[in-house]
Amino acid sequence: MPARERGRIMVVMPAYNAETTLAKTVADIPVGAADEIVLVDDGSRDRTVDVGRALGLTVVARDRNGGYGANQKTCYDEALKRGADIVVMVHPDYQYDSRLIPMLTGIIEAGVCDVVLGNRIRTRREALQCGMPTWKYLGNRALTLMENVVLGQNLGEFHSGFRAYSRRVLETIPYHHNSDDFVFDQQFLVQAVHFGFRLGDVPVPVRYMADASSISFRRSVIYGTQTLLTVVRWVAHRMGLRRDPLFTRTP
């Protein structure tokens, strides 16, 4: 059987004040694992843009801070425009182990999944010992259980910021209707389920450190509430109670 031709793999990094962690995140990406690395800066107040350019990355600097979700919209627009076949999102704060990028992309290349996430919750003990706050762990577990049950999935966690998507996923999902805030990620996964894409995950280490970005307890409560609302919106759409733009393909 002839070898399958590898598609164009692009890593996108939604960045905000990542000056101190960007270089080591990039250094961990295996040689040849990506054809291009695109850094989208969301109005950082530090030298993130300068560091990215010094590293030889393709840097897109947004005019102002629009939020985490708005940054991702730019990331995926750029990836599609630049001809990516597989897109990997890596946070440049060194919280996720970018050495594992070939594992995520390999599952997509093999045709096993369309969406692959890094799963940080291998055991409760590991997650807590590696610095995940107890309240964040409990929220992660409760929301993931609810989402798995309602959406009919079996993911280790729904709340990872380390993800890979096939091009078809990005071309199908109307992500420009999504929030500009942190709930963008959850809306995107619910949309992926709605449009029939296959989701999977791989284990990744837990990294919580002073330099890694993390939202506050108050923002996490808002994020959790918005996640629940997203699932309710999906159920209402599926039941025909309302036509929701999140789950309606744009012609």
Image (cartoon, helix red, strand yellow):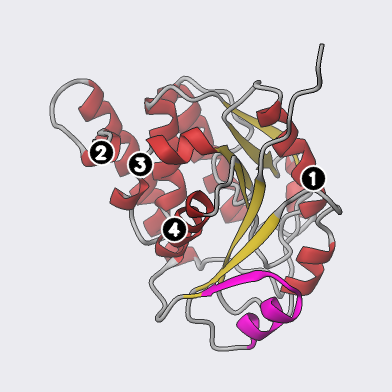
Label 2 secondary element: loop
Residue type, numbered disc 1: Leu
| Disc nearest the viewer among 1 and 2 | 2
Crowding around mark 3 (Cα neighbors within 10 Å: few <14, some 14 to 19, many 20+) is some
| Disc nearest the viewer among 3 and 1 | 1
Segment tinted magenta in the rendering: 47-60
Residue type, numbered disc 2: Thr
Q: CA distance from mark 2 to mark 3?
A: 24 Å
Q: Is residue 69 above or below residue 2?
A: below
Q: Is residue 122 visible?
A: no
Q: Residue 97 at what x, y percent from top left? A: 78, 53
Label 1 secondary element: helix
Instruction: Tell which circle, 2 or 4, labels the residue nearer the N-terminal end.
Output: 4
For residue 10, side relative to residue 40 (left or right): right
| Disc nearest the viewer among 1 and 4 | 1
Residue drawn 27% across the image and 27% down it: 235
Instruction: Tell which circle, 3 or 1, labels the residue nearer the N-terminal end.
Output: 1
For residue 240, side relative to residue 93 (left or right): left
Q: Residue 195 at what x, y percent from top left? A: 38, 26
Q: CA distance from mark 1 to mark 2?
A: 33 Å
Q: CA distance from mark 2 to mark 4?
A: 23 Å
Depth check, front residue: 173 or 224: 173
Dot label at residue 228: 3
| Disc nearest the viewer among 2 and 4 | 2
State if disc 2 and disc 1 touch (CB < 8 Å). no
Magenta region includes residue 3: no
Which residue bears the numbered disc 4? 182
Which residue bears the numbered disc 2? 250
Instruction: Tell which circle, 2 or 3, labels the residue nearer the N-terminal end.
Output: 3
